[in-house]
Amino acid sequence: MRGLSIVLGALQAASRGICKNCIGLEGAKTKVGKMVKKLGMDLDAASICCEKPKADLQTRIDSLSKVAEELEVAEECECQKTAGNCKMGEGCFVNASVDLMKLVQ
């Protein structure tokens, strides 16, 4: 969950700038949303002996899910690098954020 918090923070920052119009952000939002849903399903299937820790974890997952849903993405998206608007250089900040999540899973 810590990794998701970091990735969501990075995506929130990206959604406030030029990346808001980027198709990469739209894909990242979808991927992170799926990761949060899977985390919730895994928690439901987990055998945790005490209900309080499980409820606390579910509250955190619900919070992460809400943040993921609220990421602002423009209705019309295109690759900002292809459009000549991206100033990030070779890499894509949004895609790198999702790749970071793969490392901490």
Image (cartoon, rainbow, N blue to C red):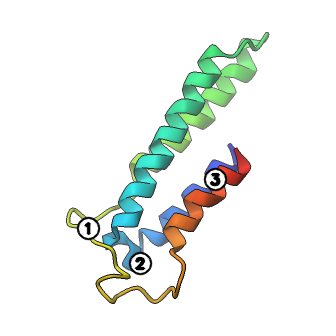
| Vertical side of 60 occupied by 31: above or below | below
Which amino acid type is shown beneath numbered disc 2?
Answer: Gly
Q: Amino acid at mark 3?
A: Met
Q: Secondary structure at mark 1?
A: loop
Rate crowding at label 1 as few (under 14), some (14 to 19) or many (20 or more) other CA atoms within 10 Å: some
| CA distance separating discs 3 and 2 | 21 Å
Q: Nearer the viewer, residue 7 or 82?
A: 82
Task: Give coordinates of residue 63: x percent, y percent.
Answer: 54, 40
Mark 3, secondary structure of its residue: helix
> Closer to the camera, 62 or 89?
89
Give the spatial CA distance, label 2 vs label 1: 13 Å
Residue 83: where, in percent of width, then height?
Answer: 29, 84
Q: Residue at x 39, y 52 (%)?
A: 70
Asked if one can make out residue 39 in the rendered structure from this viewpoint, the answer is yes
Q: Which residue is mark 3?
A: 101
Tag 3 near tag 2, CB within 8 Å: no
Query: As rendered, which of 57 and 85 lies closer to the eye?
Result: 85
- Tell me the mark number nearer the camera, choosing from 2 and 1: 1
Q: Count residues near mark 2 (Cα–Cα under 10 Å), then give few for <14, some for 14-19, many for 20+.
A: few
- Mark on residue 17? 2
Q: Disc 1 versus disc 3: distance between alpha carbons?
A: 23 Å
Callout in the foreground (3, 2) = 3
Image quarter in which the C terminus is found: top right
* Residue 9 seen: no
Residue type at numbered disc 1: Cys
Image point 41% across, 48% down: which residue? 30
Give the mark nearer the N terminus: 3 vs 2: 2
Which quadrant: the N terminus? top right
| Residue contact between numbered discs 1 and 3, judged by CB atoms under 8 Å | no
